Image (cartoon, helix red, strand yellow):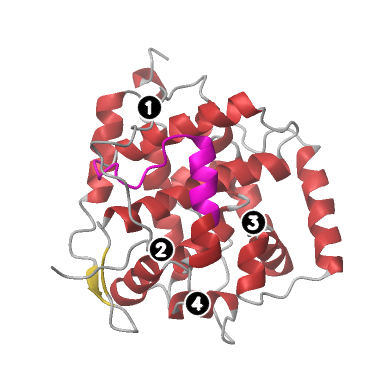
Amino acid sequence: METVVARTSAAPSSRTRPRAEGAPLGPDSVLWRIAGDGRGLMTGTAAGVLQLLHPGLGAGVTDHSAFFTEPWARILRSIPQIWGTIFAPDEDEGDSRGRAIRDLHPDIKGVDHVGRRYHALDPDVFWWAHATFTWEFFRAAELFFPLPLTRREKEQLYAESVTWYRRYGVSDRPVPVDLAAFEARFAEICAHELELTPAAEWVLHPPDGAPEPPEAPLPLALRPVAPVLTWLRGENLRLVTLGTLPDVVRRRFAIPWTHRDRLALAATAVAFRSIGATVGPRAFDVFFPPDTAHGR
């Protein structure tokens, strides 16, 4: 049996461990509220770094994409597809969109830079990508939204993220049973399993001439969040990307972060918390015609 890049701790048998409970997605869900606000993207570049630090994900990006020459094109193509799985008008459409994304990945496999086999559809690898998006929304709500989530809202958001993950049709095996288990598992991976992959090294120490985020035009599905994406350039991009990473990740990989940086990020957070939603039309209206969504 081939060895794949995956987590090192043994997973309990699916027959003995409890299954995580999901929660419905829709206009009243916490996930729609946060993902539908441009501030929910503020921690997206940090989530991307966490993905690249995972051995299997970093290797897949290195071997099977044009990431090093067109990193922003890849990101701007991916966000509308992934967000589309959140804002589907019903469960059947959500499952269809999720499985369409899953079915892009069967051939993303190979051997990483130290000789370990990886596959994008290994459940531990696929789930980590999703886990970073889940973390992205928790972190954005913590830093950039006017009111922090209550514990009950956090638990609801986690349950909604479980429903979201299941739309991809990939094994539930790595999915933590509840929010507390998710927080513990996420911290464990950050502290012990992430590595400075070649892709992560390139992002954290970009070479001269590395591509900047595009100014315009953005894909139609991203135009509602253009103000946020336009702001995320140069020093602002560095500040938000490195500053919102978990502390343990910055320490492990010796990522420079000064007291002045902390003050600048705190000021940025205050500024974004003080404004209204950064998206005019609700983001989910971009992903399907209004007259098809719940009778709107």
Quarter of the image with the N terminus is bottom left
Name of the residue lying farthest toward the bottom: 208
Which amino acid, mark 4?
Leu
Cα–Cα gap, marks 3 and 2:
17 Å
Answer few, some or many: residues within 10 Å of disc 4's Cα (few below 14, many 20 plus, some between 14 and 19): some
Assign a secondary structure to mark 1: loop
Q: Is residue 131 above or below residue 111?
A: above
Quadrant of residue 235 in the image? bottom right
Say which of 50 and 249 sits in front: 249
Residue at screen point 48% across, 50% down = 185
Which amino acid, mark 3?
Thr
Which amino acid, mark 2?
Arg
Q: Which stretch appears magenta? A: 169-187
Q: Which residue is mark 4?
A: 196
Q: Which residue is mark 2?
A: 74
Q: Which mark is residue 230?
A: 3
Cα–Cα gap, marks 4 and 2:
21 Å
Answer with mark 3 or mark 2, whichever residue precedes in sequence.
Answer: 2
Assign a secondary structure to mark 4: loop
Answer with mark 4 or mark 2, whichever residue precedes in sequence.
Answer: 2
Q: Which mark is residue 289?
A: 1
Answer with mark 4 or mark 3, whichever residue precedes in sequence.
Answer: 4
Assign a secondary structure to mark 2: helix
Determine contact: label 3, label 2, CB under 8 Å.
Answer: no
Circle nearer the viewer, 3 or 2: 2
What is the x, y in percent for residue 172? 29, 41
Determine contact: label 1, label 3, CB under 8 Å.
Answer: no
